[in-house]
Image (cartoon, rainbow, N blue to C red):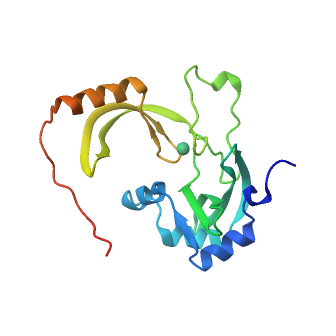
Amino acid sequence: MAIASSKDAPKIDWIKEKTKACDYNISEHIIRDFLTKKITIREIEEAIANSRIIEIHTRPEKGSSALVLGYAGEKPIHIMCADDQEGRLLILFAYVPSLPMWEDPVNRVKQGDKHMEENLKKCFFCGGKIEPIKVGNFDYRLKGQLYVVKGIPAGLCVQCGEKYITAKASMKITRLIEKGKFLGTQEAFILKYA
Ligand SMILES: [Zn+2]
């Protein structure tokens, strides 16, 4: 056995305990869910309280994470949970399971080879399907300054919302930034935590 026990996927009782004790951290993915009003932290906490593990995902070097299914009221929520290796629960991302990935909250849609398109790629984070889109506004922060890039071609994970930008597109953005070709500035809504 080469894998250290601390890299094992978290157990469901531990996940529930940590959530109840508010001893967890969330990833940036979850903040995005708050901003888009898809899932709230109260719903995540409620879902975890009556949840079970439906899949274990193992990634080299990062250890294992547990995909948990729970319900906030009637709303099914999948939550990816990991042990941050410092004794705290790490909530990586959450989503409401739906087609085209999930037949129902427990079962994935079986992906027959004939349905797989040539360029179909899977999301690195959640294994969701990537669809090509044009992003209206892509936010990018460089040395504390927020930049918004409009109309950039990207791949969007239909499940967790992660976006992927090609090397070609990222080169083009870099060139535009270097040239300082800005259309203008836009108002931003700023929340101050403290
Ligand atoms: Zn994803």
Q: Nearer the viewer, residue 92 or 180?
A: 180
Kindly give the residue lying farthest to the top in the view shown: 118
* Image spot of residue 62 (x, y percent): 65, 49
Against 103, is 134 above or below? Answer: above
Kindly give the residue lying farthest to the left in the view shown: 184
Query: Residue visible at 71% across and 28% down?
Result: 112
Query: Residue visible at 52% across and 69% down?
Result: 43
Against 79, is 3 above or below? Answer: above
| Quarter of the C terminus within the rendering | bottom left
Q: Nearer the viewer, residue 112 or 28?
A: 28
Against 140, is 133 above or below? Answer: above
Query: Residue visible at 53% across and 66% down?
Result: 25
Where is residue 150, by image quadrant?
A: top left
Ligand 1: quadrant of the figure = top right
Q: Is 175 left, or right, of 186 in this rendering?
A: right
* Image spot of residue 27 (x, y percent): 50, 58
Kindly give the residue lying farthest to the right in the view shown: 1
Q: Is 8 left, or right, of 182 in this rendering?
A: right
Against 41, is 159 above or below? Answer: above
Q: Mark yes or no: residue 64 visible.
A: yes
Q: Mark yes or no: residue 50 visible.
A: no
Query: Residue visible at 41% across and 32% down?
Result: 165
Q: Is 189 left, or right, of 167 in this rendering?
A: left
* Image spot of residue 86 (x, y percent): 63, 66
* Image spot of residue 176 (x, y percent): 23, 29
Q: Is 45 left, or right, of 191 in this rendering?
A: right
Q: Nearer the viewer, residue 5 or 39?
A: 5
Number of numbered tags placed on the structure image:
0
